[in-house]
Amino acid sequence: MNLKYIVDEESSGKTVKTILKTKMQLSGSLIKKLKYQQKILCNGQPVYVNSVVDRYDILEVCPRPDGVCSSIIPQNIPLDILYEDQSFIVINKKPGIVVHPTSNHPDRTLANALSFHLKSNDMEARIHPVMRLDKDTSGIIIFAKEPYSQNFLVEQMKEGTFLKEYAGIVHGIITPETGIIDLPISRMEGSIILRKISTDGKPSITHYEVQKYLKGASLLKFGLKTGRTHQIRVHCQAVGHPLVGDSLYPLLSSEVSSATKTISENSCGNISDIICSNFPPIPPKIINRQALHSYKVAFVHPYTKQAFELTAPLPADMADIVEILGK
């Protein structure tokens, strides 16, 4: 796909570079790359980025895919593709699969599967992550096929116009039915994985809304104002309602939970209305991962500039919990 912009009266007299940044929302690094590739055109001809444009001039750029990543081995792993076009692909990720290769998971990742998919369809594209999901979190995840789309979508996240909603099942009957958890999060000392609530942590805001009360549990919808690592998981544990099945952030003892809650209230003072009740027992091993699912996204499409929305239904393991505990 090509991006086009017809210069209006307001933009007349400005440089190509200014319009590329402010009107077409291209990053500086992408502009530099397109300049050397001579992919920046004005009225069909290559143009210098410092050139001044006139009203009705037509600027056009072609942010093409930047080639495959040779370090990611294509592997034939089934994908649940919710949507795909020339600019990005949306996957409904299964729980238990890692997104990118690591030293502990060098292959059989989502990136390997996507590399195979693109190669099988003769698409010489390098995947550019737009979102991240933990290994055992399921649901919607987006990959851009070229830098422009990645930057356009990530900028929406920074501006707070990119909607991400999650479904989660937590221990206990949480009240009130809607609320905001505003607790700063920092890295746990001595761990590269774990996070904790800390007065000197980064600002972290999670909105929640009860969708259904179950026996000893609550099905919630989460919205993120910020996007810290493990944010929903840490916040749920901090208010005494951890996600069912979460082995990293499990149900705390009453003593530890009370201490955590006191720290949280002293730092932000806004979760005192969330009730930490004694929970009826939930059947053991009802799920072998945290009950968290990325179920909805809404944003503006990078090229069409139209509103775009997708949802992914609850996976079988979480749907089973709702059925079992909802009887």
Image (cartoon, helix red, strand yellow):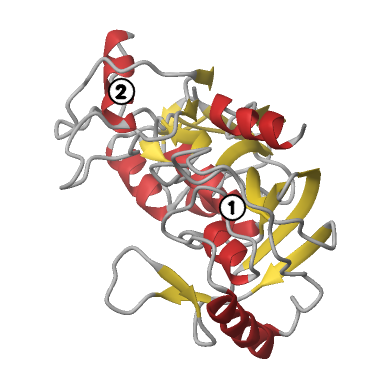
Neighbour class for label 2 at 10 Å: few (<14), some, many (≥20)?
Answer: many
Does residue 32 appear to the left or right of 72 in the view shown?
right
Cα distance between the residues tagged 2 and 1: 26 Å
Q: Amino acid at mark 1?
A: Met
* Residue 107, position as x, y percentages in the image: 19, 32
Tell me whether circle 2 and circle 1 mark residues in contact (CB < 8 Å). no
* Residue 127, position as x, y percentages in the image: 34, 33
Occupied quadrant, residue 167: top right
Question: In the displayed image of the protein, which residue is found farthest to the bottom?
Answer: 266
* Residue 103, position as x, y percentages in the image: 15, 47
The residue that appears at 14% across and 35% down in the rendered structure is: 71
Q: Which residue is mark 2?
A: 113
Q: Name the foreground residue: 23 vs 189.
A: 189
The residue that appears at 21% across and 21% down in the rendered structure is: 74
- 279 w.r.t. 127: above or below: below
Q: Amino acid at mark 2?
A: Ala
Q: Quadrant of the C terminus?
A: top right
The residue that appears at 50% across and 47% down in the rendered structure is: 245
- 126 w.r.t. 199: above or below: above
Q: Name the foreground residue: 133 vs 41.
A: 133
Question: In the displayed image of the protein, which residue is found farthest to the top?
Answer: 121
- 120 w.r.t. 192: above or below: above
Neighbour class for label 1 at 10 Å: few (<14), some, many (≥20)?
Answer: some
Label number found at residue 130: none
Does residue 238 appear to the left or right of 148 in the view shown?
right
In the rendered image, is residue 283 in sight?
Answer: yes
Q: Secondary structure at mark 2?
A: helix
The residue that appears at 55% across and 43% down in the rendered structure is: 291
Q: Which residue is mark 1?
A: 157
* N-term-proximal mark, 2 vs 1: 2
* Residue 216, position as x, y percentages in the image: 71, 50
Does residue 146 appear to the left or right of 210 in the view shown?
left
